[in-house]
Amino acid sequence: MFVGIDIGGTFTDGVVISDQEVIKLIKVPTYDDISLSIEEALQQILAGLEPQKIEQVTLSTTLITNLIMQDQLAKAGLLLLPGPGANPHQLSFACAYKIINGAVDYRGRVIKPINLTEVKEACQYFLDRKINNLVVACKFSQRNPSLEEEIAAFVQKNYPECKVLASHKVSGLLNWVRRANGAFYTLATQEACRTFQEKIKTTLAKLGLHCPLFILKADGGTLPLEVSLCYPLETIFSGPAASTLGALACTEEKITAVVIDIGGTTTDLALLLAGKPLLAERGALINNYPVPVRSLAISSLTLGGDSSLLIEQGKLRFGPRQGPALCVGGPVLTVTDVLVYSGYSEIASPALIKEPVEETARVLQLTPQQFSEQVLQMFVAQLEAKLEIMFKTWEEEPAYRIWQVLSVQKERPQTLICLGGPASGIGKYWSEKKNWQVVVPAFSAVANAIGAALAKTTLKLDFFADTERKTYTTNLGGLQGTLAQRLHNIEEAKEFTLQLFQEKAKDWQLVPDMPVETVYAEGFNIVRGWQTTGRIFQIGLQTVPGIKVFLKGARQDV
Amino acid sequence: MFKTGLIFFPAFDWAISPTHPEREERLLYTRDQIFEEGILDQRKIVEYTPRLAEEKDIQRVHFCVPNIAAQTTTAHFISAGSALKLGDALLAGAIDNGFSLVRPPGHHAMRVVHGNRGFCNINNEAILVEYLRKKYQLRKIAIVDTDVHHGDGTQDIFYHDPDVLFISMHQDGRTLYPGTGFVDEVGGPGAYLKNINIPLPPGTTDKGFLKVWREIIRPLLKDFAPELVINSAGQDNHFTDPLANMQVSSQGYAQLTEELKPDLAVLEGGYAIETALPYVNLGILLALAGQDYSYVVEPQAQKQQIKQELQVERYIDKLIAYWQKKLAEIPPSKEELFSSKLIYKNSRHLYYDTDNIREQQQEEVSYCPDCPGVYQVISQSDRASGRNYYLKGISIPLYACSACQEKGYEIWERAKKEKGYDLCYLQDKKNDQYFREEIRR
């Protein structure tokens, strides 16, 4: 049995899945302290179930997202070592920074040493401003962490009141701005994460649950609670990943579709391509600051079932949510009301809103039918415009190899999976107007919890080795080192990468027989003066992301 | 918002041979530097996916011997196609300028292609120019070639085209491949002074490089008033390049880019893959995007002071004086330039360094008062190994008058019946139709 818990803004949903079927659904309020919601949810889930039958609990939590959005972050400062390159003042760093000397190049060679006097001055600058969380970020630190390590050790020794984190410990991604921001958010949320983790562990013990607990990531994979402490940022924005995976679980393995999750205020769009959610090309943004986190390519628009209908200079447009729909006791006419009036939704009786709809139509000098049609047409047009941008971005994903350019066969989906309250109404309308297959799955209201429960644990390893310099690095923060053995060819490099992968797989608690996919594997000759002096290897391994089991009979076509 | 389009295509799976300078590794460190900077997260820089050029795009420019397949790999189609894609984005208004950071390069590829010359098979910039002129009815385009090697392929392709101004600044041909690009190669009689060569002495630094730009090229561009400026952005003038002898730094390249403001820049050569390319490419990209590039300083440049020697300085000043005087003269008329026979004839040998071929050519352009006139070439290859071809190519210019267009077809019909040719080609740029005929003996 798999348990999934999705902590939403207002409610926390829980599901229990056994043998491809949802056997239990629960709903509790989301409290300020989300660990209380989790406890309550688990209590209800366990009622009448034997705890030892539960194989795994997965949470999709808003903990980190909330901390960030509510600006409850611990203050931190960046010590930056940019070296040659772009002007660091024109880059998007998420907090205060000081630039200091010292540089490493792309091969990991130190090209400029550090000056400890400068480090001292920078530390003092931050301490004077009551900032004692410090991040050290050096360009190419993943290729050679020595400067970051030296500074971190110096700070720790001389300023014991400071907490310091080096950017290479957070990520090995080639993008020092993302690494620096990632280290900042990690440092600023780590304490809250630790507290959360301890509370959850206590709760589990109290309830007699001894199964592994996983957290859903923004890329639709999961990771164990213990590991999440090292990579707290991975758990941000897991909501859209949860719903997209939920949509997948309710359909079938190789589906290619647009997933649309319509809420009261906003709508999220995602793409499933042959059963895999499309990832954002460069990674996630937090408050517009780039971070080293893989996430689904999600497109959001401020438009939902409760969006109000405004008339300005005789023209109709959508306004912000002012409350629930009129037909369920809200203050103003909304998109949902129009769905009800025109028969696309049956959540209330059309009689309740007949008058205001007709009145609004009169103001616009339209028949009520024309008015309803216009509202729905405008709604769908906005979704389509967003979709068009999404498709374009997907089609324009860069390709750096011939085989990638040749293998593109990007056929746009013609299937729409609708989730969320107003989704079935919009879905019906869409299927009438467009030549699309529209699916409104059963359990679409708890798709998030289903997605969390069924998401596979995923691990991706991007390996990079330079045999001339005898070093290797990876995308995983902290996983880098010296090559003790010589890697003569791509086969040996693959073997070495696989070993690293399997070691990490243990921490990640991956199922032992999970298939490992080679995303890319290439070798470069380092030629100097017509002599091959070494090799560079780039190898990407991952477990295929997706769903553990598909729900029986959940797909319902409109 | 001002937007710079970027297509980065390092072709990590393509090389001329495993240790050739044009190999998989060439843009690896450039990738590292540009990705690590985090600048691609900025919305000012829009990265596009490459696409393949079509055969017709290549036919519009080249006579590939014996056919396109023999002279190209998929990588060539992608490299050329990437420039076309950025051209489309530029003319659609989606971007304000663009950088096609791609390999393989192309500026040594001439109209007739028997093989690879200077690591090039097909000419990316020429394919771009002809595509844009055909598709968007552009007429006047300038190409500024800042590779250290003379852009002899591009010169050859547009030598008789009065609507394309080709300017190449490069290391003097007496000291470097391909051994051409002297000041007296000024364009055919119908395109006088539309081909400008600035052969620089070895040891030229940023100072000389920028002086030549400001005092010769900038005024030339101003006078010509092109609708589009393309930069053949080779990077081997760099002071660490292993194949040449210049002293230009990434700052010099970036500053030139900032002042030149090319609409599209296309990577050409540059083989200091570690010491130059990561920094020069970054500098050019930042300059195109209007970002500060003053922090882009190579580690070697931090250590050493690069100084232009006095004799280099004097030579450059003389070169500038030469061009300023020449450009101030009243040009002779087209009729005078064609001389009394009203026909241009040229006979020459060409050398293909990569593929070991010697080519013998006879070119002919007939005078027309109304248009650039029909171009004809007869070519015979002499290969160190492999089959040789004897061919005739006819080219009807894009802005040909109808009489010349007709004449082009007459020559083509005759040529096919003439004895001896293995292959005949007809380029009708005006109607965008291209013919090739293999003649069986």
Image (cartoon, coloured by chain):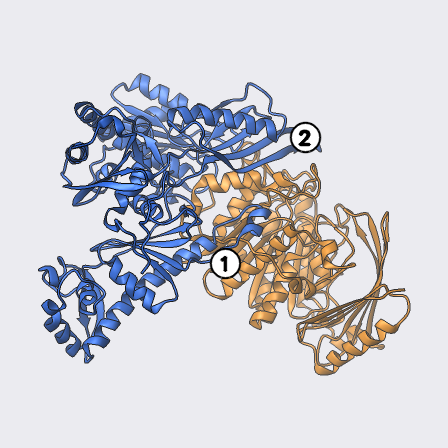
Disc 2 crowd rating (10 Å Cα; few below 14, some 14-19, many 20+) is some
> Which residue position holds label 1?
B97
The quadrant holding residue B428 is: bottom right
- Residue A527 screen position, x and y as percent: 66, 33
- Residue A394 screen position, x and y as percent: 44, 53
Q: Helix, strand, or loop for circle 1?
A: strand
> Which residue position holds label 2?
A532
Query: Could you tell me which residue is drawn at 40 percent across and 32 percent down?
Result: A171
Q: Are marks 2 and 1 on the same chain?
A: no
> Foreground: A36 or A82?
A36
Report the Cα–Cα distance between label 2 and label 1. 38 Å
Does residue B11 appear to the left or right of A79 in the view shown? right
Question: Which chain's residue wears label 1?
Answer: B
Question: Which chain's residue wears label 2?
Answer: A
**Can residue A169 be seen at all in this image of the molecule?**
yes
Q: Helix, strand, or loop for circle 2?
A: strand
Tell me the quarter of the image containing the N terminus of chain B. bottom left
Disc 1 crowd rating (10 Å Cα; few below 14, some 14-19, many 20+) is many
Report the chain shown in orange: B
Residue type marked 2: Thr
Residue type marked 1: Asn
**Can residue A143 be seen at all in this image of the molecule?**
no
> Foreground: A97 or B379?
B379
> Foreground: A196 or A216?
A216
Tell me the quarter of the image containing the C terminus of chain B. bottom right
